[in-house]
Amino acid sequence: MPKICEFLARQKSESCIYAVTLLEPLDASSTKVIDIAKLKNTLYQRLKRLFGNEVIVIGGFDISLNTDAENSWKPFFHPHWHLIFITKLDAQYVRERLKHYYHQTDIIKRPVRVVKVNSYNRAVSYMFSPYFSKRVRFLNTKRKGRNPFYDGKEYKLNGKEICKLAKKLMHNKVQDMLFLYGGRKYRASSKEKPVNDFEFRITQKQG
């Protein structure tokens, strides 16, 4: 982790660094099989179409069990991404471009989140989640001065839920959950050697 933080710090003088969350517009009917390689390739191609060589992206795959307190939908394991964007582009521009592919649904109200990074340690821990969780949506009626709105709380998965998720991810390795976009270009165009012990290799399929 210190090496990644060092790399991020070196980019700050010339680029903006954002923590980006992307929620795939999926539901129970489209998540019966979780193919991380396919999801990574889709993300890679989307970034290529949207930003070309204007971003470097580092991050990881995450997945949570999405449920609704009112049973408005069937529970499902929801894939999403925790990413760090390194770019000279404005945050609002990045956010609006990403919304072309990551749009609102009846289940997903905030599919794109872009926040400027102030702490590199928190940014790196944000990219690589130490555990998978369950997210429960509920109607919050207790906020004074505000109309009822949908909110969410996170909980740990129970044993049965962990077993279900393990079966879905059984054919994937830890490294399959890591994502990189634009690193090869950075290495080829920079006069300086990348930070030791942190190789910038694109492992996604390229079309």
Image (cartoon, grey):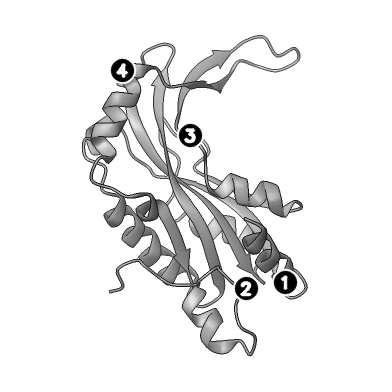
Mark 4: amino acid: Lys
Q: Is 175 displayed left or right of 147 in the figure? A: left
Q: Residue 195 carries which label?
A: 2
Mark 4 vs 1, N-terminal side? 1
Mark toward the viewer: 3 or 2: 2
Real-space Cα distance between discs 3 and 4?
Answer: 15 Å
Q: Element at badge 3? A: loop
Residue at position x 37%, y 35% in the image: 78
The residue shown at (59%, 45%) is: 126
**Farthest-out residue, front:** 197
65 up-or-down from 57: above or below: above
Q: Residues within 10 Å of mark 1 (few under 14, many from 20)?
A: few
Residue in front for this viewpoint, 1 or 57: 1
Please identify the quadrant where the C terminus is shown.
bottom left
Residue wearing tag 3:
131
In the rendered image, which residue does mark 4 sit on? Answer: 160
Q: Using the image as rendered, state which of residue 121 and residue 43 is in the foreground.
A: 121
Q: Is residue 64 in sight in this rendering?
A: yes
* Residue 57 in picture, x, y percent from top left: 53, 64
Dots 3, 4 in contact, CB < 8 A? no
